[in-house]
Amino acid sequence: EIGPGAGNTLDAIRGTREFTGGATSETWGYSQDYLGPLLRFRRGRTANISVMNRLDEPITAHWHGMHVPGYLDGGPQLAFGPGETWAPELPVDHPAATLFYHSHVHGRTGPQVYRGLAGMIVIDDPEIDDPLPHDYGVNDFPLIVQDRRFDRSGRMTYSLGMMDRMHGFQGDQILVNGVIRPKLTVPAGLVRLRILNASNARAYDFRFTDGRQFHQVASDGGLLARPLAMASLQLDGAERAEIVVEFSDRSPVSLVSRDIGMNGVMNGGMMGDRGGSMMMGDRGMMGDRGMMGMDGNSGAPLEIMSFDVGEAAPAGPTRLPTSLPSDAPALGDPVRRRNFTLNMHTGGMMRGGMMGGGGQTMGINGAPYVMDRIDETVRAGETELWRINADMMMRHTFHVHGTSFRVVSQNGRPVDSAQIGWKDVVRVQGPTEILLRFDKLASEETPFMYHCHILEHEDAGMMGQFTVT
Ligand code: C2O
Ligand code: CU
Ligand code: CU
C-alpha cells in the first residue's frame, strides 16, 4: 500500500513467477515480480508517486479512472525510458472508488499489461462514513482477474495469431491477484469484493456455483445509489465492480464465469442480445465451431477462485444499507453531440495490414491513432452526448480518460443509468450513448485518450485523443 503524500516509489522491474507447477515465467511488475501493490489514496490529499523504469523499453503509469489533468494522466505522450523516473503529484479529487493503473505506451499496452504492469487503486473518502465492509484483508478484498496462456512447459506466453489480433488475446487459465484459482478464507458474514477485470480482452459473467444472490454496490467510478441484487455480473476489460456477498452459511463456494464469446455470444448455447443471425461466425470468417471453440472453451464455466468460510469477523456491518453515499452531480442536457465509429478496418488494411498480421489497421472514425494528431477538442464544463458505434458486429468496449460518464443507452436500448452508476468503460455491441462532462484540462502536448479497451485493438490503432480547454 502506498499512502497519500508520503513520497512513494513504484519500480518497474523484471521478475519471475511460478504460476503452474515448477515452470518459471518471466514477468514484470511495479515494485513486485508481477503486478503492482494496491495503491490507496485519500480524497482531498495529494499522492506523490515516483515511478522508476528499470526495464529496457519505455513505459508509462496511467491512473485509469482517476480524474486528473492530462499532464498527470500517464497516457502515451508521458512515456519514459529505461533508467528514467516520472514523479507526478496527483491531487486526489475523486469519490471513493476502485480504480486501475497500468502502462499505456502506444502499440505496447497489450504486451506490457500482460507481462504485469498493472495494479489496483482504491480511493477512500474521509468525509463519508463507509457503511459497507471496509476492513482491508479481513472483510474487504481486491480481486484482480486476468486470463493467461501457458505453453506446454508451463511458461506464460503472449503471441498474437490472426484471431487474437481480431478479437483480442484470451487465455484459458484465470489468475486472481496473480495466482491460478486461489482459495480465499473469508469471515462468516458480509464480505466486500472489489473486482477489477485486468484482462487484455476477456469479458466475464461472474456467478457463484450455488447460484446465490449478491449485491453490487459500486461500479467504475464509485458507489451506486443503492445496492443492486443480482446473481450474475458481467465485466468487460478494465471494468470494475464492488460486490457484497453474504458468507454466513459457512458452506464452501466457488466463483465461476460463464464464457462470453468474442461476438458477445455466450458459449454454451445462450445467445447475446442480437441472436445469431448476423454474427461474424455466420459470415464465413469462422464457422460456428470456430466461434465456440476459439478460446479453447466449449462452454463449461471457467473456475475463477474458491472461498472457505471461517469464523465471523469480530467487527463490521452485518446488514446492507438500503442506500449508499454515492456522488451524483447532475450532468444536465448535452450542449453538443459527437459520433465515434470503431473501425476494424481502416485504409491500412487494404495494404495487407491486419490479415498480414502487422501494422496499424484499426481505428476510430476512419483513421488509426497517431500520437501527434488531436482528434477532438472539448470545452471544460460543457455536457456532451457521445454516440459510439462499430463498423462490424463484434464486441468492443469504449473507455474515456479524464472523467466518469453516465450510460444513456447501450446496444441500442435505453438503460437505467442510475443503476449502472458512474462509468469509464462501457461495452459496445451496438449503438451506445454516453453523457459526460470534463472538469480536468488536457493540452495538445498531453491530451486525453478514448479507445477500445480490448488492448490488442487499442494497440492496433483503435484509439483517438482530445484536448479539454
Ligand atoms: Cu485503462 Cu486508456 O486506459
Ligand atoms: Cu484510462
Ligand atoms: Cu475493440
Image (cartoon, rainbow, N blue to C red):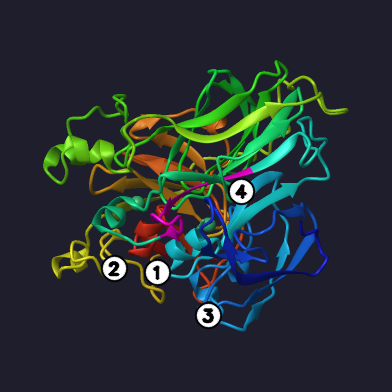
* Mark 3 or 2, closer to the camera: 3
Distance, label 4 to label 3, CA atoms, is 25 Å
Q: Mark 1 points at which residue?
A: 107
Label annotation for residue 360: 2
Which residue is painted at 24% across and 39% down in the image? Answer: 291
Residue 66 in view in this figure: no
Q: Where is residue 366 in the image (x, y as percent from the top left)?
A: 25, 61
Q: SS class of the residue under badge 2?
A: loop
Q: Position of residue 438 (x, y in %)?
A: 56, 55
Q: Mark 2: which amino acid?
A: Gln
Kindly give the residue lying farthest to the front in the view shown.
22
Q: Mark 1: which amino acid?
A: Gly
Which residue is painted at 73% across and 62% down in the image? Answer: 91
Distance, label 1 to label 4, CA atoms, is 25 Å
In this image, 266 relative to 435: left or right?
left
Q: In this view, does 54 lie above or below 142?
A: below
> Which quadrant, please, contains the C terminus?
bottom right
Q: Mark 4 points at which residue?
A: 177
Kindly give the residue lying farthest to the bottom in the view shown.
83
